[in-house]
Image (cartoon, helix red, strand yellow):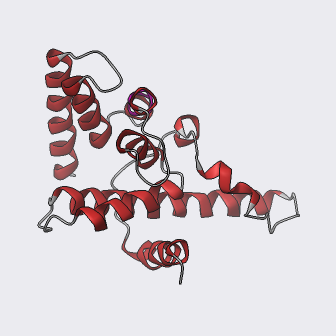
Amino acid sequence: MSAVEHNQTTVQSSRAQLPHTMSMKDTTTTTTTAAADDSSSSTDSSTDNSSGSSSGGNEENKETLQAAQWLFEEGMAWYYGSNFKKVDEKKGRLMVATAASLSLPIAVAHCYYRGWSGYTEDLTKAFQMFTDIEQNTNGYHWAQDMLGDCYDEGDGTELDYAQAFHWYVYRCVAFSVRLQL
């Protein structure tokens, strides 16, 4: 079983366990997909252009994004050792990379930031994606955290400790609000 088949199996088996933690208001505008390179290998099995087939595709896309979101959240928890998980960087990286292969914008941005999964490290592009994701999701805590890291380290933007502090505080507020839900 190849790594891609294993990752797809993981995604399919995890769909039943998906938490609804993030509202993806407009993920298509922030997605600069590396998965588009893989589009030549996938085929469109639907040749019917009726309205029924398009709504099924939207539902499938929503499920795929939810699965990718779950993979990303779990991957970050494993990578950093949060949510009562032991640090397992290899497992976390694999889960984030799988979410990126499913075109989840935050995972793609994270792969650009780290240079993971065949993405060339591009800190400027990652910074721009984190900014777009934060704006389009109305305050996604991982985007805010990564913006704080970018400003704190000068990755993709100018070093600015005040902005880093600003984004770290916003991340804490967004995360605590999410915990109260």
Q: Residue at x 15, y 68 (%)?
A: 85
What range is drawn magenta here?
A: 127-132
Q: Residue at x 52, y 36 (%)?
A: 30
Helix, strand or loop: magenta stretch: helix
- Choose between 31 and 149: the one closer to the eye: 149
- Residue 145, quarter of picture: top left
Residue 108 place in picture, x, y as percent: 46, 46
Asked if residue 131 lies in the magenta stretch, the reply is yes
Horizontal side of 81 relative to 51 (left or right) equals left
Q: Residue at x 37, y 64 (%)?
A: 95
Residue 54 place in picture, x, y as percent: 75, 57
- Residue 161, quarter of picture: top left
Horizontal side of 102 relative to 150 (left or right) equals right
Residue 73 place in picture, x, y as percent: 31, 57
In the rendered view, tell whether residue 100 sits above or below residue 174: below
In the rendered view, tell whether residue 140 sits above or below residue 161: below
Asked if residue 135 lies in the magenta stretch, the reply is no
